[in-house]
Amino acid sequence: MTEFAKMYGGSLFELAAEEGADGAILTQLEECLGLLGANPDYLRLLSTPSLPKKERCGLLDEALRGSVHQYLLNFLKILCERGQLRQLAQCAEAYRQRYNAAHGILEATAVSAVALTDDQTRRLQKKLESVTGKQIRLHCKVDPAVLGGIRLDIDGTELDGTVQSRLSGLRSSIAAAAL
């Protein structure tokens, strides 16, 4: 993540938190990211240096006024004016990190060979919350290479309880014993 994104995303969070709008702005920020991701031509248009800044900001104003918080709209206009709209995803990530830290939320990713059922996901989330003492936002992914078990990544810490990991450890043990 760039220093620009940390500074600007963090500043937007601080402003939103002061006003008690941090949750609403996070939701709207993620929606804006989705919209821009689904419409890359619009993002290219807003990033075109040959189009005057005033017109680019006017396009943002026209598209989003009344549907997003004024702070978010102004933030997007600032990024557009500075030619940094392509850093929006990183700014959103910085905002999300600050939001999570302020609200005691940990991001966790569970990787398994087959999709976890809703019940398994709910039980895993509750177990992680009881162990960490924090609210867990759990994302589940499927990777057939895992073979079985679960690999967890919780706030940068990896816990690997997969068959793939155990087999790899067994291979290393056999290779070391054969020497």
Image (tube, rainbow, N blue to C red):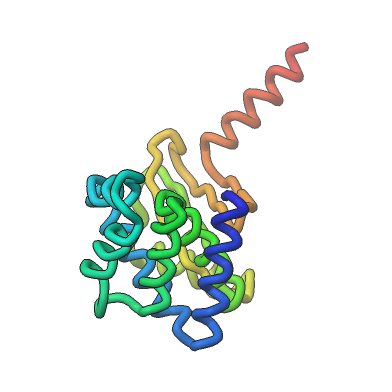
Considering the image in quadrants, where does the C terminus appear?
top right
Relative to 175, say whether 149 is above or below: below
View extreme (top): residue: 179
Is 27 displayed left or right of 22 in the figure? left
Residue 4 percent location from the top left of the image: 57, 55
Residue in front for this viewpoint, 119 or 93: 93
Q: Which residue is found at the position 25% from the left and 80% from the top?
A: 66
Residue 48 percent location from the top left of the image: 32, 45
Residue in front for this viewpoint, 159 or 18: 18
Residue in front for this viewpoint, 154 or 102: 102
Residue 10 percent location from the top left of the image: 57, 67
Q: Which residue is found at the position 56% from the left and 52% from the top?
A: 153
Is 161 displayed left or right of 37 in the figure? right
Q: Which residue is found at the position 36% from the left and 71% from the top?
A: 73
Relative to 173, say whether 16 is above or below: below
View extreme (bottom): residue: 19
Tell me, yes or no, if residue 37 can be seen here.
no
Tell me, yes or no, if residue 86 can be seen here.
yes
Relative to 105, say whether 7 is above or below: above
